[in-house]
């Protein structure tokens, strides 16, 4: 064929050229020389070179959109590509980094050996994903980094290491501050509960707090003493469970609904004592409000005025006798 060139099987000089171009051109068939039109080969060669350049530009762009340091290294640990964040972190130009290894760039030999061992593990198929507390060798600042590494195939089919490190110091510091704030709020909540309980306990008459479903959430010692029950036997239970009969339970439920709808209750009643069964006179008060978390609760108190009413009755009886 006119204008063709015969490419010999043993053209070692051109062999490296073909490999560099990324072209898979069979140079021999059954040991015979293969003729190839020069212009066709030239087009294929430049097409391959252009494709490789386009692919490399795309990969570099992908690295650049990552705001944290990212890089590609070959199997020997030499940096093939780095993004701007990587150079900024190291305070070096790309020319000072590309083509060099961790042994040449690491701040000390221990770090270099650690990186090399990690790279070997990645090339063997492992995936690195861990947190690393370190000090920036260039700025001197302590930082907590999330390290991610894995291997992939490069454009020429060779295995490479793809890595990135993400500075999560601010995230962890924020988490620490949030945890400290949560601990403080938890401590405040515990102190508030203890304060409310102590406040209720100094009241000599039965006082309680119930949630909107009627469960007792706070009671004072006088309330438990009047019922001859422990706090654990009362808290978390409702009047339906604790009332002596269905009529009493229904009355309490009705009053609770009235209170939650915005009314308040202030009344005097007579009823058997829950333990002795003696008739007692009480002033019953109930109201509603929001608790510390904004949930509606019922606050109630029962004041035993039996002695007062008996004294009044005795006085009336004495006055009546005097008038006689």
Image: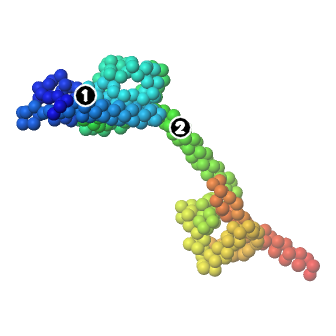
Apparent side of residue 34 relative to residue 139 in the rendered image (left or right): left
Q: At 60% from the left edge and 60% from the top edge, which residue is drawn?
A: 217
Distance CA(mark 2)–CA(mark 1): 50 Å
Asked if marks 2 and 1 touch (Cβ < 8 Å), the reply is no
Quadrant position of the N terminus in the picture: top left
Q: Is residue 120 visible?
A: no
47 left or right of 191 in image: left
In this orientation, which residue lies closer to the viewer: 88 or 196? Answer: 88
- According to the picture, the residue beneath numbered tag 1 turns out to be 20
Secondary structure at numbered mark 1: helix
Q: Earlier in the sequence, mark 2 or mark 1?
A: 1
Residue displayed at 12% across by 27% down = 8
Q: Position of residue 207 (x, y in %)?
A: 67, 62
| Left or right: residue 69 compared with residue 114 | right
Q: Residue at x 63, y 54 (%)?
A: 293
- Residue 174 is tagged as 2
Q: Which colour scheme appears in the figure? A: rainbow
């Amino acid at each position: 064929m006119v204008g063709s060139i015969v490419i010999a099987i043993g053209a070692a000089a051109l062999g490296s050229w073909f490999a560099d171009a990324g072209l898979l051109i069979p140079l021999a068939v059954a040991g015979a020389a293969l003729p190839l039109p020069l212009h066709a080969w030239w087009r294929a060669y430049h097409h391959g070179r252009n494709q490789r350049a386009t692919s490399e530009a795309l990969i570099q762009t992908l690295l650049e959109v990552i705001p944290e340091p990212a890089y590609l290294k070959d199997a020997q640990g030499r940096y093939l590509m780095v993004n701007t964040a990587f150079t900024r972190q190291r305070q070096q130009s790309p020319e000072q980094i590309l083509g060099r290894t961790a042994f040449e760039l690491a701040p000390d030999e221990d770090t270099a050996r650690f990186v090399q061992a990690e790279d070997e593990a990645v090339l063997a198929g492992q995936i690195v994903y861990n947190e690393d507390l370190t000090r920036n060798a260039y700025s001197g600042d302590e930082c907590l980094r999330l390290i991610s590494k894995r291997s992939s195939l490069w454009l020429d089919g060779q295995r490479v290491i793809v890595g990135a490190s993400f500075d999560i110091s601010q995230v962890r510091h924020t988490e620490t501050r949030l945890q400290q704030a949560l601990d403080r709020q938890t401590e405040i909540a515990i102190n508030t509960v203890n304060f409310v309980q102590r406040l209720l306990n100094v009241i000599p008459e039965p006082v309680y707090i119930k949630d909107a479903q009627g469960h007792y959430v706070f009671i004072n010692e006088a309330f438990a003493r009047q019922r001859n029950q422990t706090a654990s036997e009362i808290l978390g239970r409702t009047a339906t469970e604790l009332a002596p009969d269905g009529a009493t339970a229904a009355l309490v439920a009705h009053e609770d609904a009235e209170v939650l709808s915005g009314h308040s209750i202030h009344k005097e009643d007579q009823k058997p004592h829950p333990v002795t069964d003696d008739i007692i006179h009480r002033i019953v008060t109930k109201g509603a409000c929001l608790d510390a978390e904004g949930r509606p609760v019922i606050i109630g108190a029962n004041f035993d005025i039996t002695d007062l009413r008996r004294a009044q009755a005795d006085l009336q009886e004495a006055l009546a006798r005097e008038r006689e």
